Structures are given as structure tokens and as C-alpha cells.
Image: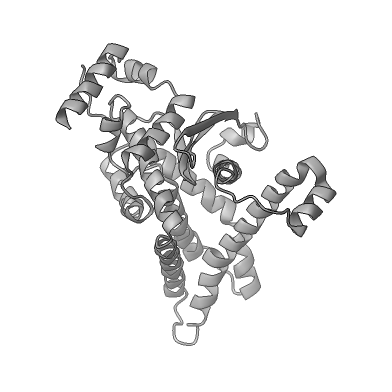
Amino acid sequence: MKKNKKNRSSGIGGQAVLEGVMMKNKDTYAVAVRKPDGEIEVTTEEYTGIMPGSKLKQIPFIRGTFNFIDSLVLGMKALTFSSSFYEEEGEETKTDKAMNKLFKDKAEKVLMGLTITFSILMAVAIFMILPYYLSSLLNKFVRNMSLLAIIEGVIRILIFVLYVVAISVMKDIRRVYQYHGAEHKCINCIEKGRPLTVHNVMRSSKQHKRCGTSFMLFVMFVSIVLFFFIRVQNPLLRVGLRILLIPVIAGISYEIIKLAGRSNNILVRIISAPGMWLQRLTTREPDEDMVEVAIASVEAVFDWKAYLKETFGYDVDESWMEEEKQTVRDRE
């Protein structure tokens, strides 16, 4: 086997869902879920996102906004699918009846749109407006606007970290974090040139530079820089600018994380370090059953054997796979 220690981007990405993993490769995504009976259910669909085929989605610093929205929509679809296996059956609520009556077969899409809209509004209120409000309480004590901008940014980061820590104590979230680790381990395994086996995945890193956690942290840091240099005196305009600049912040952050995913120079490692550190909170070590689910999701959308041959120059045939499995069994 040809050894290759370089880490090369595979182009696939994903997210953890309830008792499962979603993986996306180009316009195809798969969601693999461990059902209550222990079996793995895998569904594969196409998702081209909003404004499919638009050239705007290819322009640097603009494409990041579209990518962010697409990620939210796809993430919600994947979560809805995974949670359907664990929903308790019961009577239809008044809200469900009203939605079905008003929107008929489009009720689910409308509800998803409302949920995403509400989530975005809450995120803006908590991570953009609240830090500004809290920092403005210090106006009487801190006259330096540059220092206030830095304080606002620090408050924003602290709120985000506290949020991550707070939800990590929930049992269901802890398991989602384990599946998050399984997702990263699968991608790292492939990008390190290792065949996608449970043994190889388990010994791979649970942290990855293209993670959404790192993206959110980049958003926090980019907002500090922008708000440091862009200032207005009117309080309402300040709040308005924080909202209007969100697409700009998302666009810049997307380009940074995209660069981090395909480069490993010293500068990239430095700017990626805080996000990699924060991933210690948002990822946990998965068990082998979770890794099996993540592998099933990867294999539904990505030919990792062809990738290893093209990128690292060696074939992985069935006899090799059986030999690898026997080696693992012998070690056990």
C-alpha cells in the first residue's frame, strides 16, 4: 500500500442528526439513522439549494451567504427525517390541524420555513443584538469606542461558548456530539488516505478544520473586525448595520473556512486553532455502532475507493478489506 501523509480535501461534508449522520457530496446527500430496532436506515436524495444554477453562488464572498442558507435548510430536512423514527405517536395537535387545513400538502415545507426563519431571528437576537446591548451598558464607564467594539466581540464569543457548553449537558445533545465526532472521523480517515473501515475511522481525529463550529467562530471574529472599523453614532443605525452586515460576515467566514479546508500552512493552522479547540466541546468520541452509521452515510454518496485510487494511488479491493477485518479481529 502506498503511504501518503498529506491531508487532501475530499469535498464531502455533513452534520450529525438524531441518532445518525447526514453526508453531502455535490448535489447528493444521504442521511443514515440507527433506528430503535438497531437497524440502519439510509435515505439518499438530491438537493440543489436555493437559486440552483445561479452564477451568484459561484462568486467569492457572495456564495458564502447562499451556502449558509442551504446548510440551514438541508440540516433541518435531515433532522426532520432522523427525528421521525423517534417521535411518539399521538393525537394530531390543533396547530397540526390548522397547518394542514391552510397549506394542505405544503404544510411540512411551510412549517420548516417558519422554523428556520425563527431560528435565524433568535440567532441574530442572541449573538448580534444582545452583545451590542450589553456592551452599550458600559458607555458611562468606557469612552473609547475601539475598546467598546472589542468588548462587544468578547461578549459575543462568551455567549456562544456558554451556549455550546450549556446544551452539552443534555443527554440527547451528548449523543449528537458523538455522532458529530463520527462524521469528522470518517472524513479525516478518507482524507488521510486510509480505507474507510471501523478500525481506521476509530483511530482518526474527531476534529476537522471545515467544521460548522469553526465557521461560527470565524463569524464571531470577523464581526469583531468589521464592527471595529465600521462605526456610526446613531444607536438604531448601529443595530441595523449589525443585521445588514450578516451576509458580508458569512461570506468572508465561508472563504476563510474554505481556505482552511484545502491548505495546511502555518497561517491557516493558527487561524484554525480556536475553532479546533472549540470542537473539543462539540464533538465526543463515538462508539463503533455510531461509526458504522457514519460510514453507511458516506458510502451512500461518495466512492471513497475511487477517491483513494485517484488521490493516493492505490486500489482497495474486497480481499484487502477482508484481510483488514481479520487483522482487527485477531487484535481483539
Q: Residue at x 63, y 60 (%)?
A: 121
Q: Nearer the viewer, residue 128 or 278?
A: 278
Where residue 170 sits in the image (x, y, percent)? Answer: 43, 61
Let me know if residue 234 appears in the view: no
The location of residue 5, given as percent across then percent down, is 22, 29
Q: Residue at x 57, y 33 (%)?
A: 58
Q: Quadrant of the N terminus?
A: top left
Q: Which quadrant holds the C terminus? A: top left
Front in this rendered view, residue 86 or 273: 86
In the picture provided, is 5 more to the left or to the right than 157? Answer: left
Q: Is residue 144 above or below residue 212?
A: below
- Position of 25 relative to 160 (above/below): above
Q: Is residue 298 left or right of residue 197?
A: right
Q: How many marks?
A: 0
**Which residue, as the protein is rendered here, is positioned at the far left?**
331
Could you say where residue 140 lies in the image, as x and y percent from the top left? 49, 87
